[in-house]
Every structure is written in C-alpha cells, then in structure tokens.
Image (tube, grey):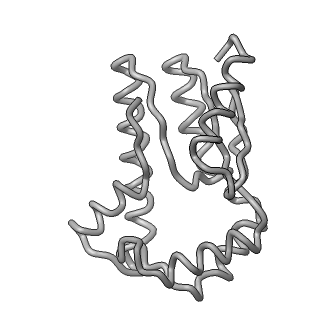
Amino acid sequence: MPFVSKDTFKERLYETFGSGEELQARIDEAGLAILFSVVESQLRGGVSVAAESNFDANSDVEPFRRLVEEHGVAVVQVHIGGDVDELVTKFARRAAGGDRHPGHGDEPEDADELRAKLESGLWEPLDLPGLLVRADLHEDEAAIVERVRAALDERSDV
C-alpha cells in the first residue's frame, strides 16, 4: 500500500523554496495540499493509500470527508497519542538531536507551543466515519499494525 507523509512533501518544498518563519505556514499548507492530491490520485486509480500527518482536528476533517464521499472509501484512522509531558519531552529531544530536516525549524524551546496545541485538542482524532484505532507513543509499529488488523477482522464494513 502506498504511504504518503506530509513531512516528506514539505522537505522537498524546503529544498526547492527555502525555509524560515515567512515560508513556514505556506509550505505547511502546500505540503498538505500535495498529500491530499496524491491520496486522491491513488483513490481514483482504485488504490488504497495510507496518509500520515499531524492532522488538524478542525481543518483537516472536510478534505477527508470529501474523499470518503467522492470515492466511497472506508477510513481506518490510527491516532498515536500519549501523555502530554512525554510527547513534549520527546519533541524537545528530537529537536535538540538535529536528525530532522532543518527546514522544519524545530527548536527545543518550541516545546511550550507544542504543549499548548496538544492541550487544546488540535491533534485529537478526526471526526470521521470509519474505524479509529488509538495507539500510544510507546507501542512499536508491529504492535500497532497487529491492532489495526485485529480491528479490521472484527469489522466487516471496512
């Protein structure tokens, strides 16, 4: 199954257009637009696709609903969350580690902004029809995949 990630698209955009505060919002918006375009292209071709991002519980619901309506697809949403303090610590550690593409501009001091967004519910599961599988940041990928498979086995409409 094809897998698309907003950050992959954003990183190519950073490499093409540069990065910085003045570009951040536009590149984020463009990365998401490309993600939805690629997803729609795959669905039009009859191909299931997995899409990954920190989807916004407010603004990213409608594009998914449109895809469901236009293509009759079944949504399987995997939401990975956890304790806010742990998520913030993990973010700060990743930002300090320097392993992420520099275009993202993540700094350890951005942790307070991240905390506020998490506490506001910005990245809670999307209100979409279909199957929701909640996972914890401590679960390994294989365990999450197994939980998704088990949930799909229980449901015949997905």
| Relative to 27, residue 151 above or below | above
**Residue lying furthest left in this view?**
16
Residue 120 % position (x, y): 77, 65
| Relative to 121, residue 143 above or below | above
What residue do we see at 36% from left, 60% from top? 10
Residue 134 % position (x, y): 73, 43
| Relative to 129, residue 7 above or below | below
- Nearer to the camera, 72 or 154: 154
- Nearer to the camera, 24 or 133: 133
- Nearer to the camera, 90 or 126: 90
> Residue 45: which quarter of the image?
top left
What residue do we see at 49% from left, 19% from top? 71
In the displayed structure image, the side of residue 111 where residue 13 appears, left or right:
left
> Residue 119: which quarter of the image?
bottom right
Residue 19 % position (x, y): 33, 76
Q: How many marks?
A: 0
What residue do we see at 71% from left, 35% from top? 132
Quadrant where the image shows the C terminus: top right
In the displayed structure image, the side of residue 79 where residue 23 appears, left or right:
left
**Residue lying furthest top in this view?**
156
Residue 147 % position (x, y): 68, 34
Quadrant where the image shows the N terminus: top left
